[in-house]
Image (cartoon, coloured by chain):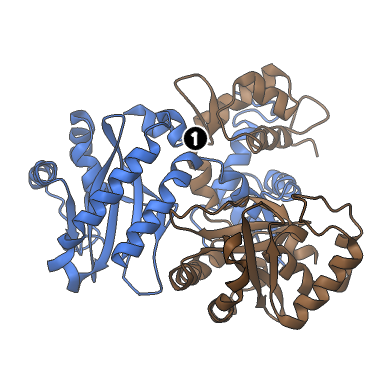
Chain colours: A blue, B brown
Amino acid sequence: MAGGSRESGRSVTSRVLAILEAFEQSRTALSLTQIAEGSGLPLSTTHRLVAELTDWGFLSRGANGRYQLGIRLWELAQNAGRQLRDAARPFVQDLFSLTGETSQLAVREGHEVLYIERIYGTKRVPRASRVGGRLPMHATAVGKVILAYEEEWVRTAYLNRQLERSTAHTHIVPGRLAEELDQIREQGYATTLEEVRLGSCSIAVPVFHTGRIGAGLGLVLLTSQAGTMTRHLPALRGVSAQIERATAHIPLESLLGSHAARKT
Amino acid sequence: MAGGSRESGRSVTSRVLAILEAFEQSRTALSLTQIAEGSGLPLSTTHRLVAELTDWGFLSRGANGRYQLGIRLWELAQNAGRQLRDAARPFVQDLFSLTGETSQLAVREGHEVLYIERIYGTKRVPRASRVGGRLPMHATAVGKVILAYEEEWVRTAYLNRQLERSTAHTHIVPGRLAEELDQIREQGYATTLEEVRLGSCSIAVPVFHTGRIGAGLGLVLLTSQAGTMTRHLPALRGVSAQIERATAHIPLESLLGSHAARKT
């Protein structure tokens, strides 16, 4: 698709989106040159498109002349997958109130878990995830529980991939992981012990939607609490059931603005 | 700027962004025709750009053939204004834990308040705001408190506008509102009583950044609690001070990817 671009090759649309995506990897503001490098576009094109994106508030230019994603983009994006987040949020909130532990809801996006909700206090627990962030499925409790209840072919496809190791404790042996997933389905929950980060452990239960796995609901705790984290299962299961009830009426395709989710 | 568009007039960039913005007003998925109407673009152009945006995951196509904003967009947008939200969120969480009431943090975007954080339980309180949503400044406690501490010219410019009435109780007489803003600065907090929605009241305190007003931190409560809501002031002030400390090191321009904020 030319996207009406005079320059042949990449369409203007793809250039605009490439510029926005250049900000994904960086937590700090970027210079025009950095944006050009990140998006693989000529500086002149970058300059022109960045100016337009800034006019629209999709990018914002700091006093230091560097750019970052504009709050306008964030504001607009709140409409994506809002039905699920709006429906689930108060219950994730309840889970935090009940347990006092970092509470999170995640869905599968391709080969990773995407954290769509996270409620936490000021208590410091080492964690890698953030709202809008992704982690490998096999290293996280929410990811394992989603994988465990996914369709057979999704599990098989995942286990046939090269599984990365986040810590020395990450389970990456496909055969062992397959057994673990079977056990997760038997017991109805998944746990991890320092598989993502040293110092923390996690536990998660499935959240179903129209009879299939929809999300993972979990807690992240300090490693010192690993021995007792199953005491939170009643709270996790109760809240999961509430989220299932609250989202049952939402059609799957409008649950999350996610194409990956529809691929399953 | 032509944005490399062969069609003269609106650039391709502006067309792409217009398509994304067409989803702002709607909570439901849109058909191609509705997107074309919302963005003011020819159906053929809309069809082509929507296809590209869908390939990138910025839009997603439901089983019903309708489109919505893709979770990919939401994921990317999490990087906008993240420093402020990441720094403030646990403290807003504490405010909720301390008060048990709907707790929110808002900033000024142009003539409105934009809610960037909201923590609430399952308790039902009539409210108009949502995260990523906007409300008029003069009808909300967070908006009044921001307006009260804004620079003189911002206050004056705002009061000279036509002030809309959300309920019969909304204060819209400029003179009276000006007096109210002076009083808010004297007492250090703002309150509303059914000015946004019947059935709810609110209270808010200022959050300063580098000596100027940065945000409003507030609670929304049931009207029946209006008489006693000032008992939450110590919690509001304490948490506001914590947010100020936690964000003091963040340069203003990277605090929120907001161009409006820099206009002041």
Secondary structure state at the residue bearing disc 1: loop
Q: Which is more toward the observer, A260 or B120?
A: B120
Identify the residue at image location x=79%, y=35%.
Answer: B2
- Which residue is found at the position 44% from the left and 44% from the top? A87
Q: Residue at x 37, y 33 (%)?
A: A248
Residue type at mark 1 is Gly
Question: Circle 1 sits on which residue?
Answer: B57
Q: How many marks?
A: 1
- The N terminus of chain A lies in quadrant: top right
Q: Residues within 10 Å of mark 1 (few under 14, many from 20)?
A: some
* Nearer the observer, B258 or A15: B258
Above or below residue B59? Residue B103 is below
The answer to whether residue A57 shows anywhere in this view is: yes
Residue B176 lies, in percent from the top left, at 87, 67
Tell whether A51 sits left or right of A215. right
Q: In this view, which residue lies farthest toward the top?
A: B44
The quadrant in which residue B219 appears is bottom right
Q: Quadrant of residue A139?
A: bottom left
Evaluate whether residue A110 shows in this view: no
Percent of width and height locating residue A109: 37, 40
Location of residue B92 in the rendering, given as x and y in whole percent from the top left corner: 51, 68
Whether B130 is drawn above or below A255: the answer is below
- Where's residue B23, x and y in %? 63, 34
- Using residue B140 as the reference point, say whether residue A144 is left or right of it: left
Rendering quarter of residue A213: top left
B123 vs A157, left or right, is right
Image: B68 above or below B131: above
Look at 26% across and 47% down and name the residue there.
Answer: A143
Q: Which quadrant is the C terminus of chain A positioned in?
A: top left
**In front of the other: A82 or A20:** A82
